[in-house]
Image (cartoon, rainbow, N blue to C red):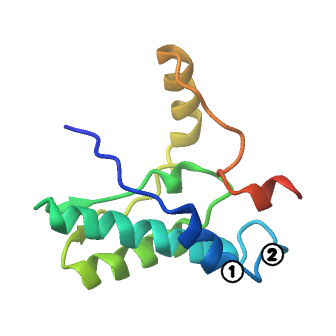
Amino acid sequence: MELLKCSFSPEKWYELVTGFEDEPEGGERCEICFRMRLEETARHAKENSIDIFTTTLTISPHKNSSLINRLGKEAGLKYEVEFLEADFKKKDGFKKSIELSKKHGLYRQNYCGCEFSLRK
């Protein structure tokens, strides 16, 4: 399996979340961000003839898996690519991800990457 990196436009992200800077973690800003990222992934999958896509966002105990899966399915329908629905935190998935990260020396940041979530 090959890991593909999609493009990310900070300018587009700032444009989309303007006005939502003070939203709490898990609020409307997060939904906007999830939608943008999942749509970009689905678009990239379609353009590269990839049949199915998913996200690791659902491994976090702080993320709403049902929302992420709903948005992933919507993006999949929009770009005609199947979305693999999952909740990777189940069955000790989060704990296992920490153990594997340590074992393989992987960097783990302690927040989602949103500068506004750091303010809280």
The residue drawn where x is 53% and y is 69% is 34
Q: From the top left corner, tell me how far across and down residue 20 is, in percent.
A: 76, 79
Q: From the top left corner, tell me how far across and down residue 93 is, in percent.
A: 51, 41
In this view of the protein, which residue sits in the foreground, 98 or 55? Answer: 55
Q: CA distance from mark 2 to mark 1?
A: 7 Å
In this view of the protein, which residue sits in the foreground, 107 or 44? Answer: 44
91 is higher (above) or lower (below) than 103:
below
Q: Is residue 38 visible?
A: yes
> Going by the picture, which residue comes out furthest to the right?
120
Mark 1 Cα shell of 10 Å, populated few (<14), some (14-19), many (≥20): some
Mark 2 Cα shell of 10 Å, populated few (<14), some (14-19), many (≥20): some
Q: In terms of image quadrants, where is residue 82?
A: bottom left
Q: From the top left corner, tell me how far across and down residue 32 is, in percent.
A: 58, 77
60 is higher (above) or lower (below) than 110:
below
Closer to the chain start, of discs 2 and 1, is 2
Q: In terms of image quadrants, where is residue 46?
A: bottom left
The residue drawn where x is 44% and y is 71% is 69
Image position of 31 (left or right of 18): left
Q: From the top left corner, tell me how far across and down residue 105 is, in percent.
A: 53, 16
Question: Which residue corresponds to mark 1?
Answer: 28
Q: Specify the amino acid type for callout 1.
A: Glu
Q: Specify the amino acid type for callout 2.
A: Glu
Decide: marks 2, 1 in contact (CB < 8 A)? yes
24 is higher (above) or lower (below) than 104:
below
Label 2 sits on a secondary structure element that is loop
Mark number, residue 5: none
Image position of 40 (left or right of 28): left
